[in-house]
Image: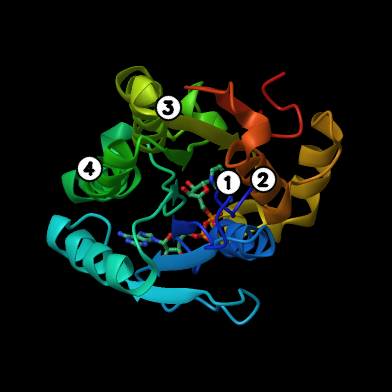
Amino acid sequence: MTGQAAGQAAARTAVVTGAAGGIGQAICRRLAADGFAVAGLDLREPDLSEVPGGRAYSVDIRDAGSVRQAADRIRTDLGAPWLLVNAAGVFSIQYVTDLREEEWDRILDTNLKGPFLTCREFLPAMIEARDGCIVNIASTAGVRGGRKRAAYCASKGGLVLLTRSLAVDHGRDGIRVNCVCPGLIDTEMADWIRHDAAAMADFSASTPAGRIGQPADIADAVCFLASDRAGYLQGSVIMVDGGVTA
Ligand SMILES: NC(=O)c1ccc[n+]([C@@H]2O[C@H](COP(=O)([O-])OP(=O)(O)OC[C@H]3O[C@@H](n4cnc5c(N)ncnc54)[C@H](O)[C@@H]3O)[C@@H](O)[C@H]2O)c1
């Protein structure tokens, strides 16, 4: 059982942030195929042409008012979400010594405060229903340091522990909260390396899986975590990184 609630015909509603991005789009497509009614949230207009029944909502996840406005519309259009996937994110490559305060705020506000705001918005109805699921998209950068990645690593490390803390707080309310940590995935966010043939050859040669990850690799993990087959996964940190942290 995935997007259909037990004994009910109605599809479960899934909210996916970052729905216009490479990974978010793949997650939306996969969740729709699994029977979810999908609400795709992003700053940009998501392409939901391959998401049957999918609805797009313009949101800045850094802003509580914007999140609230979208949430109200989603509840009216599709009902209270059973699943929340926090996939919106931004990346930055800089030494702390060169990092402007505004850039630190942009990274932390998007990657950590955003998921806090969406969880705070959608959790109460899940708790009331004693049924719900949250999947956060963190990163390998959430479990280890990286060169010129201090702000990004701090934001993703925070997201990993936000995940685990929410699992501790709300597991007994019937909510499962887990996260996926992607390695290098073939999306716009990997533009700093994916068009450099020599760097990509080095990456593939040094990675156990021998290749860059695809958005579908992450969507598969999310759909597993959102399924009843993952019923005993709680506060888990799933590395989907081709083995780079193995
Ligand atoms: N691509 C990778 O190599 C990689 C690796 C590890 C983790 N991740 C994580 O996966 C997630 C998805 O990344 P992606 O690869 O699809 O990148 P992407 O750049 O293709 O997509 C990110 C999306 O987030 C949206 N977004 C950014 N700020 C927002 C805001 N304030 N409000 C709403 N939407 C906002 C962007 O508009 C964009 O559509 C991110 O959290 C990222 O950190 C990606």
Quarter residue 188 falls in: bottom right
Q: Which residue is mark 3?
A: 160
Task: Return the x and y of residue 23 as percentages of the image width and height.
Answer: 59, 56
Residue found at the far left of this picture: 65
Mark 2 and mark 1 in contact? Answer it, CB < 8 Å. Answer: yes
In the displayed orientation, state which residue is furthest to the bottom.
49
The amino acid type found where label 3 is placed reads Val
Which marked residue is nearer to the observer: mark 2 or mark 3? 2
Q: Which mark is residue 6?
A: 1
Quick check: marks 2 and 4 in contact, CB under 8 Å? no
**Dot 4, crowdedness within 10 Å: few (<14), some or many (≥20)?**
few
Q: Quadrant of the C terminus?
A: top right
Residue 1, disc: 2
Give the distance between the C-alpha atoms of the residues marked 1 and 4, in whole angstroms. Answer: 26 Å
Mark earlier in primary sequence (1, 4)? 1
Location of residue 136 in the rendering, given as x and y in whole percent from the top left corner = 46, 40
Amino acid on which the number 4 mark rests in the picture:
Arg
Q: Would the CB of label 4 be found within 8 Å of ligand 1?
A: no
Secondary structure beneath disc 4? helix
For marks 1 and 3, the one nearer the N-term is 1
Label drawn at residue 120:
4
Does residue 228 sit above or below 125 in this rendering? above
* Amino acid carrying mark 1 in the image: Ala
- Marks 4/3 in contact by CB < 8 Å: the verdict is no
| Residue 110 picture location, percent across and down | 30, 50
Q: Quadrant of residue 155?
A: top left
Q: What's the image's color scheme?
A: rainbow
Give the residue displayed 79% in from the left and 50% down from the top.
Answer: 198
Left or right: 171 as drawn, with respect to 197: left
Q: How far across and down, in percent of the image, does residue 73 sit?
A: 26, 72
